[in-house]
Amino acid sequence: MVEFALVVPFLILVTLGVVDLGRVIFLNTMFSAAVQEGARIGAVTPNFTRIQSAVEEELVGVPVGDVIISIERTDVYTEVGIEYVFVPVTPLLSKIVGAEGLTLERAARMQLLGVFP
């Protein structure tokens, strides 16, 4: 029983660390898909509201108010970016990352449909 009591805190810490790592990978993948969808819509239409709503529809489990979405459109391309501050659950990882959290950023750029530079 004593060995179990000594090992349990370490196992809980490792488990929470793996959960945090999984959350970061999930968010990173979801943000990549969201900006790609926004850039794809932006390549077809100049409507910024439609581009932003396309990005927001791809965000699952993240409050839209916590995400910063940037849209840039030129004569040649549309670029969509996302910025989000990830705060880990694991206390030890929180000390490593800092109280501010870890900033996740993703961006995608697509050439406008029918425009050839």
Image (cartoon, rainbow, N blue to C red):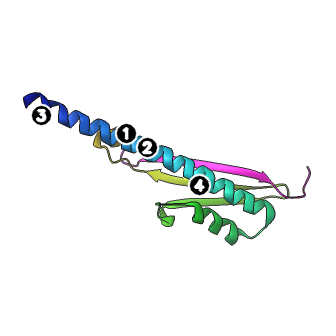
For residue 106, the mark is: none
Which residue, as the protein is rendered here, is positioned at the far left? 2
Distance from Cα at disc 4 to Cα at disc 2:
19 Å
Sequence order check, earlier mark of 1 and 3: 3
Percent x, y for residue 77? 80, 54
Residue depicted at x 56% and y 60%: 68
For residue 18, the mark is: 1
Distance from Cα at disc 3 to Cα at disc 2:
26 Å
Q: Secondary structure at mark 2?
A: helix
* Mark 2, residue position: 22
Amino acid type indicated by mark 1: Val
Residue depicted at x 51% and y 65%: 64
* Mark 4, residue position: 82
The local crowd at label 1, few if under 14, some if 14 to 19, many if 20 or more residues have their Cα within 10 Å, is few
Distance from Cα at disc 2 to Cα at disc 1:
6 Å
Q: Which range of residues does the magenta coloring cover?
A: 98-117
Percent x, y for residue 92? 30, 38
Amino acid type indicated by mark 3: Ala
47 left or right, relative to 34: right
Residue depicted at x 80% and y 58%: 74
The local crowd at label 2, few if under 14, some if 14 to 19, many if 20 or more residues have their Cα within 10 Å, is few
Query: Is 111 one of the magenta-colored residues?
Result: yes
Query: Is 73 one of the magenta-colored residues?
Result: no
* Mark 3, residue position: 5
Does residue 54 appear in this view? yes
Contact? badges 1 and 4 (CB < 8 Å): no
Distance from Cα at disc 3 to Cα at disc 4:
43 Å
Amino acid type indicated by mark 4: Ile
